[in-house]
Image: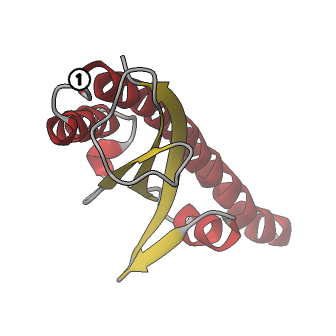
Amino acid sequence: MLEFLVAGPVLLLLIFSTIQISLLWAGQGSVDTAAHFAAREFAQSARSDAGKAKRDALSRAMALCRRRPGVGYAKAALTSLVISREGSGRGPRAPMAGEAYRVTLKHWVELVVPFADRFLFALAPVEKARLGDRYYLVLHATRFVTVE
């Protein structure tokens, strides 16, 4: 009986942690896909209007990140997209064909599995935030793209 009282919570934590890690792994795949499509969206329309291309890329990335597994249980999510020119040193100007850009997507996800959220939050070696009793980790992906 005593062994069950000791092993029960440990086994429960292991099961819940496995569920949360699988949701994070699937979420990372969604973030990678969103970064790819956002970079593509930016590369195709950056020469005509760079501001509109950035807005379209962000909206595409947000839409894809919202469709990741486990998002139905989360209360909030934050997505940011940073598009920067490779080889800095030049002043700000309109994108030209053949220029390389770095597209970095960061998506904050809430740890939604009970009991495992505090444990994984403490162990995670990534950017993290705590808002009240909610725990958030950041998933990020970087893509390089050349303007068409």
Q: Locate residue 18 relative to residue 131 in the image: left or right.
A: right
Outermost front residue: 90
Residue at image position (85%, 66%) is: 3
Give amino acid for label 1. Ser
Tell me the crowding category of disc 1: few under 14, some 14 to 19, or many 20 or more residues within 10 angstroms, Cα based.
Answer: some
Q: Quadrant of residue 68?
A: top left
Q: Which quadrant holds the N terminus? A: bottom right
Choose between 138 and 40: the one closer to the eye.
40
Q: Where is residue 111 in the image (x, y as percent from the top left)?
A: 46, 59
Q: Residue at x 66, y 60 (%)?
A: 13
Residue carrying label 1: 45
Q: In this view, does 122 lie above or below 132?
A: above
Instruction: Tally the marks.
Output: 1
User: Horizontal and vertical percent for residue 4?
Assistant: 77, 63
- Mark 1 lies on a secondary structure that is helix
Q: In this view, does 16 lie above or below 31?
A: below
Q: Which colour scheme is used?
A: secondary structure
Quarter of the picture containing the C terminus is: top left
Give the residue at the far right of this rendering: 3
Q: Report the front residue among 5 and 70.
A: 70
Q: Where is residue 20 in the image (x, y as percent from the top left)?
A: 55, 49
Q: Name which residue lies at 16% across and 33% down.
A: 49
Residue occupying the point 33% across, 38% down? 65
Q: In which quarter of the image is residue 115?
A: bottom right
Q: Nearer the viewer, residue 97 or 60?
A: 97
x and y percentages locating residue 129 in the rendered image: 46, 74
Residue closest to the eye, 93 or 61 = 93
